[in-house]
Image: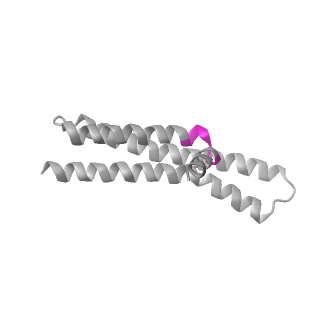
């Protein structure tokens, strides 16, 4: 299982996947801090919102850059099989999927923090 996770990180493009992983870890640390110590002035909550949105957009940027590179290679090739194209699209979707996962996990944490306050 661990090898599969790191293979997916590398397949999705380390330039986009590893920063997203770091953002997820940072947000989890901030969520734990907010749960344990509270967030009276809302600074942690605001930071969590911004980082989660950045992770989402960062993943989508990875998709677009990957697609541009893939289409450049496809336009140079004389014939591309549907299997190669499908595999490339699958790999291209890893980065935005991980960005969406990070966004949703952090937003769920924010919802729980808000529910805990009231």
Residue 19 x %, y %: 51, 37
Give yes or no for residue 14 being in the magenta stretch. Answer: yes
Q: How many marks?
A: 0
Asked if residue 47 shows in the view, the reply is yes
* Rendered image coloring scheme: one colour
- In this picture, residue 115 sits left or right of residue 12: left
Q: Quadrant of residue 51?
A: top left
Task: Residue at 30% x, 50% y: name it.
Answer: 109
In the rendered structure, does residue 5 fall within the stretch colored magenta?
no
Q: Position of residue 47 (x, y in %)?
A: 32, 37
One can see residue 50 in this view:
no
Nearer to us in this view, 79 or 31:
31
Most extreme residue toward the right is 78
Q: Main secondary structure of the magenta part?
A: helix
In the visual, does 33 lie left or right of 92? left
Q: Position of residue 108 (x, y in %)?
A: 32, 53
Residue nearest the observer in this picture, 109 or 50: 109
**Which portion, as a residue range, is magenta?**
11-17
Q: Residue 44's quadrant in the figure? A: top left
- Residue 35 in which image quadrant: top left
* Residue lying farthest to the left in this orientation: 118
Q: Position of residue 4 (x, y in %)?
A: 60, 52
User: Which residue is at a point 42% across and 42% down the rendered structure image?
Assistant: 24
Residue furthest bottom in the image:
82
Residue shown at 83%/49% (left/top)?
76
Residue drawn where x is 48% and y is 41% of the image? 21
């Amino acid at each position: 299982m661990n090898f599969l996770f790191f293979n997916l990180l590398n397949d999705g493009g380390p330039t986009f996947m590893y920063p997203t992983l770091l953002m997820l870890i940072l947000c989890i640390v901030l969520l734990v801090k907010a749960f344990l110590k509270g967030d009276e002035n809302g600074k942690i909550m605001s930071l969590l919102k911004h980082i989660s949105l950045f992770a989402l957009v960062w993943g989508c940027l990875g998709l677009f850059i990957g697609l541009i590179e893939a289409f450049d290679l496809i336009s140079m090739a004389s014939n591309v099989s549907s299997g190669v194209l499908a595999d490339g699209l699958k790999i291209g979707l890893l980065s935005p999927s991980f960005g969406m996962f990070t966004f949703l996990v952090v937003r769920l944490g924010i919802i729980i923090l808000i529910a805990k306050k009231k």
